[in-house]
Amino acid sequence: MNLYIKGLGCISPQNTFGDVTFMENAVIPEGEYFTCVEPSYREYIDPKISRRMSRIIKMGIASAKMALADGGIAEPGAIITGTGLGCVADTGQFLDDIISSNEGMCSPTAFIQSTHNTISSQIAINLTCHSYNSTYVQRAHSFESALLDAALRISDGCMENALVGGVDELTPRLADIAKTMGLSRSLRDSNAAKGFVPGEGSVFALVSSDASGKNYAKIRALRFAANVSGHDAVRALCDEALREAHLNADAVDCVIDGNSSSDEGEFDSIIKSGFPGAARVSFTQYCGEYFTASAFGLWLGARIVSRGSLPSHSNQGGRAVTNTLIYNRAGDSYHSFIILSHD
Amino acid sequence: MEEIIAKLKSEIIAQLHFEDMSPDDIDADAPLFGPDGLGLDSIDALELILILEKNYGLKIADMEKGKQILASVKSMAEYITANK
Amino acid sequence: MKQRIYITGIGIISAAGNNVAEVLSSLVNRRSGIDSIRFLKTELSAKYPAGEVKLSNAELAAMLNLPAESHSRTFLLGLAAAREALGGKPTANSARTGLISATTVGGMDLTEEYFAALHNASHAARAADIRVLFSHDCGAATEKIARTLGLHGMISTVSTACSSSANAMQYAASLIRNGYADRMLAGGSDALSRFTINGFSTLKILDEAQCNPFDDNRGGLNLGEGAAYLLLESEESASAHPEDILSELSGCGNACDAFHQTAMSDNGEGPYLSMKYALADAGISIDDVDYINLHGTGTDNNDVSEGRAIERLGAKTIPPYSTTKSYTGHTLGAAGAIEAVISILSIRERMIFPNLNFTTRMKELSCDPVREVVRNVDLTHVMSNSFGFGGNNSSLILSKASAPKNKSAETTR
């Protein structure tokens, strides 16, 4: 795979847009879970139109436009989004309307914005972009599916570049549901066995086959599978990624990891046994856990590779990085490996 | 009539999410749709119909007639007054 | 040269029939599946007819030999169609067989029951179990179908409103061409839900009578539910059993209207580009298309925009076209795959199925849709359209397997 990251846009619980101070200073949220630091949306969306947009749509449009501006492209060859749960606030709103009115009079706005493809569509409407447009909704591989679709279409010559995003929002109701289902814990609770800390974010990358000009990083490999378990099988998937990248394991300087499964031991052993000499930084400590958190992992990886070193606040800050592996695991069986390089 | 116009303006601001607006910003005689007015679209039209149904118990069966009723805040108020 | 993608299996369940044979019989006998709603508990059941599958959840579970527990209807419909598409074909080498599904509603049928039960004691008590929410997201049913069928290849789910399963087929074809799989089940499933029927009702685009799409006096759409999957296979894999080849997926197009969240542009720019790209991808012109299976929902907006877009393609003679949504209702995320299966049946049976309930030509258009069952017709290329909310427009070209690419430039092999 030879895909270049030309632009990035990131709205997350950290300072990751505008004057990006995250690589020097990480924000530790004050609440129970991670919520995004948001821009003033007027800069990205006409207030007459944004008035009825819910947060997730505004986040999506703004971060997509940030990535385009960053990459210096006005109209992308494709817009492909991954989202695990879609527009949760609008879905909840419409459900409430149906129930409270006993299927009487409900607001159409909440319904039309509740569909999962609203983010990709609204970006296209904002840009008047007629290009290929799609939305993937496969849990923790929603973003990976979007990225693979873009990579294959670019490599097949359908287009030169694509805007690829991973977007999910956290509402108070959703946080409460995750807690009641026994999946999550509060940020204030350090006992990881109780579950993950919920988060949210919207990350877009402008990816291209064009190597010239400024690039954050090259994506050399993308391998993921949703039905893999056991050390050997996961290791085999990781090796596939290394082969795709034409890299040996010892060329990986840094592993960026995210794990929402309860099996810390097995997750840990894949990394320690496979990459004993690599620096290691977990990305979910910055953005929390959500279905498309691996997009934040990609953003972090691209930033690290581009500057050549880890964030100053990581305990291995300053260490030189050329090749980085992003390994995300969700539940027992969703695993994804992305390899980024400086070249 | 003035009372209904004032009430409608607040309801429009709330239902159509004009958070930065106050009732004084809306001209009761100005067209609601199109570039000269608030610039509402087809989804907003449905929300206005919902306001009439939910808050005033009035249904619009004929969409052609509906366009005239929804032309401005004043025409909506007149429709409400005529059908009380 | 682009690798060919063959279709070697089809499966379908809809209001018009619970499998391929039943659906074909309905199509040939002009028997619409749109009727009063029987199973979905909704205050709107008396107001709107719909294309509901004629089996309850309990009957579906029994038919599928599933234990009696809470299953999302989207999963049940999906499994039924996926199983039929896979047929009795062995899943040895299951690591190279994957599933790309599509849905708009996911497990919402269970979710809405759960929240209603919290709010209102008169709904089923079982819905108070929060664990049903594990089935809520769009990817849940896909995972479950793959696991039940023993498929160990790549899985994913597309959600682009009414074009979802057409886009699932495009992605599946791309994965096969690039070596990520030998075979992919591709398609989608959507079940009726209070969420959807109320949603469409608020948009005032539902017909209170049986729909009459592409008619000048059309009154809106009828919602439907169902599922369909197609087994897509690489050339190499299909060549081992050519007797199973039904058709070729010879072209795919995807374009965004980029105009409005629910309304299509007047001149149908998105649909026009979608069809144009599909034709270019197949290496054919509109004059090579023998039949168009329309998106044709019956709404004022879709039908005029789609009709205009077709006329813009510049055909010497506009190909015969019809919508089969008057048989199945609008099956949302499943529509692309359901209509791809119907298109393949058209090719296989050498028939064109009619546009039911049509009487009056739309004033904006220059021709009528097909009104009667047409038999003994050779269809080499069929175009199937799926145009969704948000301007997500997709078109597929299904072809007789190994047909020459361009009639006017045919060469001997």
Image: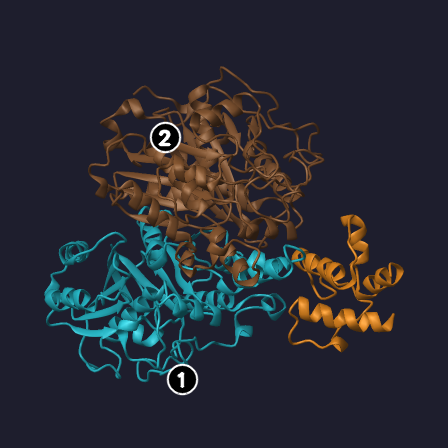
Question: Can residue C257 be seen by looking at this rendering?
Answer: no
User: Who's the residue at 34% across and 21% down the image?
Assistant: C411
Q: Which chain is drawn using brown?
A: C
- Give the amino acid at mark 1: Glu
Helix, strand or loop status at disc 1: loop
Residue A95 position within the rendered picture, expressed as x and y whole percent measured from the top left? 56, 59
Q: Where is the N terminus of chain C found, in terms of image quarters? A: top left
Looking at the rendered structure, which numbered label has been put on residue C47? none
Within 10 Å of disc 2 (Cα), the crowding (few <14, some 14-19, many 20+) is: many
Name the chain letter of the residue that bears numbered label 2.
C
User: Who's the residue at 35% across and 37% down the image?
Assistant: C65
Within 10 Å of disc 1 (Cα), the crowding (few <14, some 14-19, many 20+) is: few
User: Who's the residue at 80% across and 73% down the image?
Assistant: B6
- Give the amino acid at mark 2: Glu
Looking at the rendered structure, which numbered label has been put on residue C248? 2
Name the chain letter of the residue that bears numbered label 1.
A
Q: Total number of numbered labels? A: 2
Q: Is residue A311 left or right of residue C274?
A: left
Taking depth in this image into account, of A323 and C165 the one nearest to the observer is C165
Question: Can residue C291 be seen by looking at this rendering?
Answer: yes
Taking depth in this image into account, of A72 and A102 the one nearest to the observer is A102
Q: Is residue A343 left or right of residue C140?
A: left
Q: Name the residue under label 1.
A: A30
User: Who's the residue at 25% across and 25% down the image?
Assistant: C241
Q: Which chain is drawn using orange?
A: B
